[in-house]
Image (spheres, rainbow, N blue to C red):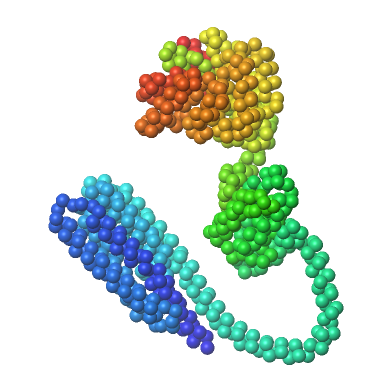
Amino acid sequence: MSKQQNVISKIEIERDTTDMLIGNSFVGFLMTIFAFSGLVFFFENDAPSIFTQKLQLWGVMVSVSILRLFDSLYWRVKLAEKPYNPRPALIRFSAGLYSTGVIWALYSVLFYSTMTTIEMAATMVVLAAMAGGAGTVLSPSKTLVSFYSTALLVPMSICAIVDEEEKFFILGVLGLIFWFGIFLSAFRYHKFFISTLRLKANNNSLVEQMKIERSETEKVNKLLIASNEKLDASNANLEGEVERRTADLYKLSNRDPLTNLLNRNGFLKHLNNLLDTTRALENSLALLFIDLDGFKQVNDSLGHKVGDIVLAEIANRLQNYTEENHLGRWGGDEFVAVIPYANVDTARAVAHAMRSGVTVPIIANDNQVTLDATIGIAMFPEHGETAVDLIQQADLTMYDQKRQQRGSVGVFSEVLHNEVKRDQQLCERLRCAIDNRELTVFYQPILDVNSNTLSSVEALLRWKCDDEQISPDIFIPLAERSGLMPEIGAWVLNRALIDLSHWQFKQGLAVSVNVSVSQLLNDSFLKTLDNALKTTQISSERLHLEITESLFASDKGAVRVKVNELVARGIKVSIDDFGTGYSSLSRLQSMPCDFIKIDRSFVQNSSEESDTIIRATLLMAKEFGCKTIAEGIETEQQKFHLSQLGTNYLQGFYFAKPMNAQNLISWYNENH
């Protein structure tokens, strides 16, 4: 009996292998014809004889591909999903594949010496792409995938390596490395495929055995049912009452009354049960943490009654993408969902589908409400072994996605975990950075184009933590998110004005200090500013405040009020990173400023488009009575070019890198 089962398993495995090879080959036939045709007809060749040979080889390739296509159609119509003998079909498929591989190899060897550089690169890309695709499609057969990938990549790679001119040597080496990589991947896929087929064959045998046992069980059950009918009838009323009361208690303790979804307690119980089953089956599942974007505004503007209607509708929509009891309301406008037997791609697909369902407008009490959702995904067992771990990881991922881009989907990763852990550590250190004297203000000169003399310096904050220089791109956002920016910004402002008061430089030298959104809109900002100017006895005209252009996307009215108060004090206002995000004529017209800083991305890009933007910026600045500062000057050519365009001031590494106060004094004495 065991030998017979073994024979059946081998036949089934061979048939499944044939089905996989032929069933996935249709697109490969078409790609082969298109790719071969592109290489033959796209590149011109001065020698007619060469083109004739290519044309002949193309005819053979097309003929072989068409024959293989007809053979595949015959398999699909006559053999697929039937208990056929797979050996003849597999032989025909193998013969066609060998023929195709030989033709590719002949093409590489015969025409290598006639190829131009572009044609050579294109041919290698096409062969690598075809071989890469074949590495997956042909993985059910180690023999076929080994031959085909070798035929496509090795001849051309060897020709490139042994070429006396050695101009394509590196392409040849890369081709052999790619070929070796395909071998490793294909053999790994093959092992997985064969294991899956064997498991399928064994499962089929078990299913048949289960049917027999189930039949016997049903006979026994009928006898038991007949003997218990009288007992069931007598206990029916009592059991019904117990069930009703049990259901009511369960609903009270495990259901959310608004949405009728599982509440936090009920979802955790259900998730733990699913995890036990999944763990026993050595399977996987995905945990989705869903947070609604814009719901707080609905509650604040339309009231909680409308908010409850919206939440109930969102819950109904989300249930369309999950199985029963696989969705819960975690609290407020947060939902959690579990997707059994899911991989990362499946989880992403479900998450994006959920987002699409959420974004459809909702009519609630004659109000149209449009929301979005940010979703974090954690996978079991990769990202956590317990329900609490998975929910924490998915929640963490959701908040990171919301910070980066609302209305998006993200998957937890160790990199994210380490980044968040490091961010937390840096936040704690940043709180004490001022007291620990870890912060330093560096200064970068800004020079007048006409006189080539120092006009002002920009104050740039630097943080050295445990002998590690932390980039401003890292700690400035951390300070913003943790609410430390007003305090740190005030320290920078005071430090810069104190240093300016000590320098014996040219009369009227100004210092430029960056101001963040949270700092500008902070209630104590103007008071801090006035105290700093009063304490250092620096005239307000010598203080320039740089406002990042993206700040215009905030509360425009509040920003305009603050800027007007700065102008009223005589402080100069500079718009930083101009042209990179939110600039417009209307904002310039309504927001008074003295300087416009042209972003380094336009300065260092020598294209005509960048010059057009710079000229337009200069024209706008002139119309509004503003001076212009070009930052990021690193070469003599850039200096000359921006000067010729009409920029008023220049700043960049060409003149000096940011330096501490002492080094700035030395630099000034050496250059002025």
Q: Is residue 394 visible?
A: no
Q: Residue at x 81, y 84 (%)?
A: 232
Relative to 629, 390 lies left or right: right
| Residue 593 in the image, given as x and y percentages of width and height | 54, 22
Relative vertical location of residue 427 with respect to residue 291 in this rendering, above or below: above
Q: How many marks do you count on the picture?
A: 0
Query: Where is residue 112 drawn, in percent x and y?
Result: 23, 54
Q: Residue at x 76, y 59 (%)?
A: 257
**289 vs 356, nearest the viewer:** 356
Residue situated furthest front in the rendering? 366
Q: Picture quarter containing residue 509?
A: top right
- Residue at coordinates 57% horizontally, 12% vertically from top-left? 503
* Residue 135 seen in the figure: yes
The picture places residue 418, in percent across and down from the top left corner, at 60, 45
Q: Is residue 344 above or below residue 466?
A: below
**Is 112 situated left or right of 327 in this image?**
left
Q: Relative to 458, is 618 on the left or the right?
A: left
Query: Where in the figure is residue 76, as x and y percent of width and height?
Result: 39, 76
Left-right relation of 53 to 406: left
Residue at 66% x, 40% y: name it. 424
